[in-house]
Image (spheres, grey):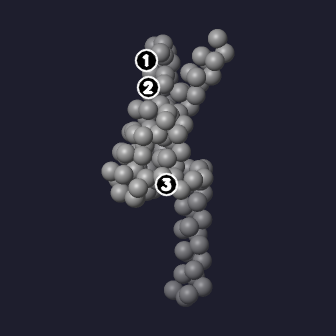
Amino acid sequence: MTLKSALTAAGLVFGLFLFLGPARAATMECPAKSRSMDDIIASLNAAKGCDAAMKVFEACEYVASGDVQFGEVVEKKCEADFLAKANASKKQAYKRELGVCDRKYRNESGTMYISFTAFCRAEVAQRHAREMRKAAGAK
């Protein structure tokens, strides 16, 4: 393999990662005291609400399996905004969408896909929380 073909292959892999990765970019620096999982989880727990927790998640992501724990915190924060108030059909729709996330990358290997699944689930929870807030504001 020549240097030129090696660089081309590396560029393709990087481009593929950018293309396949969820369309999100950290717009803030990670507010945790450090990049340790415990500090990031503490920052997520300290976030004031669903949207703030999602911003922390985006800023502090590992793009690896560690994101599952971060995503779970975001899911719980967002669910607190809507799940208890949702009717049966909304809860069923929410569970169905989480299932779509769980199946989306199930045949892929690598920890980055585990991260993508965690983000998908957190984004679904965030969307449902926003919809509930919007509906409550319209009444």
Q: Earlier in the sequence, mark 3 or mark 2?
A: 3
Residue beneath label 1, please?
84
- Residue positioned 56% across, 50% down in the render: 22
Q: With respect to residue 112, does 127 lie above or below? A: above
Q: Are marks 1 and 2 in contact (CB under 8 Å)?
A: yes
- Residue positioned 49% across, 33% down in the render: 49
Looking at the picture, tell me which residue is in the foreground, 134 or 32: 32
Give me the C-alpha separation between circle 3 and circle 2. Answer: 23 Å
Asked if residue 97 shows in the view, the reply is yes
Q: Please state if 91 lies on the left or on the right of 127 as rendered.
A: left
Q: Which mark is residue 30?
A: 3
Amino acid on which disc 2 is placed: Ala
The total number of labels drawn is 3
Q: Are marks 3 and 2 in contact (CB under 8 Å)?
A: no
SS for dot 1: loop
Residue beneath label 2, please?
80
Q: Earlier in the sequence, mark 1 or mark 3?
A: 3
